[in-house]
Image (cartoon, rainbow, N blue to C red):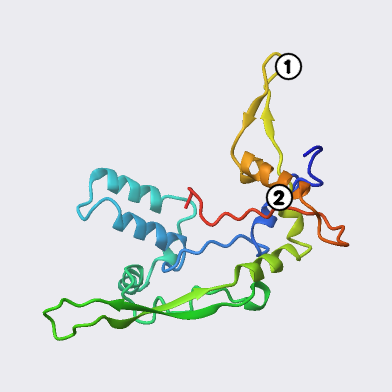
Amino acid sequence: MTGLPDHDPGEHIQLNDLHTSTSLVRDYSPYPNQSAFLLGEWYWNGGEKKSQSSFQNLIKIVGHPDFHPEDVAAKNWRLIDTRLSGESKGSNKEDDWEDKDDSRLGGWTKTPIRVNAPFHKRTLQKCPKEFEAGILHHRKLMTIIRKRITRPSVHPHLYLEPYKLFWQPDDATELVRVHGELYTSEVFINAHNKLQDSPPEPECSLPRVVLGLIFSSDGT
């Protein structure tokens, strides 16, 4: 491949581009606010027996300018701790984690999961028995891809053309190849070049690009 990509998605990115709301709101659930969260974190960390160091951490919390005593007064701490441990009734509802905007992202499909469990030959149940193991929530991958890449607001933030990235601190040193992102990897570049060298679709003049998908990250 020759030349540079037609656009740099990271060139004009701002904080507002990284979240959908107009203001950055932190969620301290199940704690009602930041002050309650800080106290809860102090309580649960450091063991049941509090040390002098732990007490000093408490002093830092209550002395912090963002700490407000009225935010932690008259709170149901037992209920908060129960929700935190996952024992609250009504918590972890089946559909709580699903995205609300199904129409934009293609909608969820629910598939029952059934598992055949074998039994020992000396038991009354000689053959495997089928058990329901819950519901698998999934989407069609191509539906999500089409929805995303066809949105005008999303396209400027997609890296569709790979490139090699080099670093040179001064003119006296040699260029150093920088590896880090998927779209600067040799695999991505080779796949892109292979696509460009292949026969195009009949009567189609649209750009041909490889869409790289990262299903997991070493940061998660």
Q: Position of residue 195 (x, y in %)?
A: 73, 50
> Which mark's residue is nearer the viewer, 2 or 1?
2
Instruction: Determine which of the numbered discs, if any, sits on residue 171 in the image.
Output: 1
Query: Furthest-top residue in view?
Result: 172
Secondary structure, mark 1, is loop
Q: Nearer the viewer, residue 98 or 70?
A: 98
Can residue 10 be seen here? The reply is no
Q: Position of residue 60 (x, y in %)?
A: 39, 47
Q: Residue at x 80, y 37 (%)?
A: 2
Question: What residue sits right under mark 2 in the picture?
Answer: 159
Q: Nearer the viewer, residue 218 or 44?
A: 218
Secondary structure, mark 2, is loop
Looking at the picture, does residue 86 appear above or below residue 66?
A: below
Q: Residue at x 66, y 78 (%)?
A: 103
Q: Residue at x 70, y 53 (%)?
A: 210
- In the image, 216: left or right of 2? left
Residue type, mark 2 in image: Tyr
Instruction: Determine which of the numbered discs, if any, sits on residue 162 in the image.
Output: none
Looking at the picture, does residue 161 appear above or below residue 104?
A: above
Q: Position of residue 26 (x, y in %)?
A: 53, 61
Can residue 208 be seen here? The reply is yes
Q: Within 10 Å of the Cα at label 2, are there few (<14), some (14-19), or many (20+) other Cα atoms? A: many
Name the image quarter holding residue 1: top right
Residue type, mark 1 in image: Asp
Q: Position of residue 217 (x, y in %)?
A: 51, 51
Looking at the picture, does residue 9 appear above or below residue 134?
A: above
Query: Mark 2 or mark 1: which comes first in sequence?
Result: 2
- In the image, 193: left or right of 106? right
- In the image, 62: left or right of 203? left
Q: Within 10 Å of the Cα at label 1, are there few (<14), some (14-19), or many (20+) other Cα atoms? A: few
Q: Nearer the viewer, residue 123 or 198?
A: 198
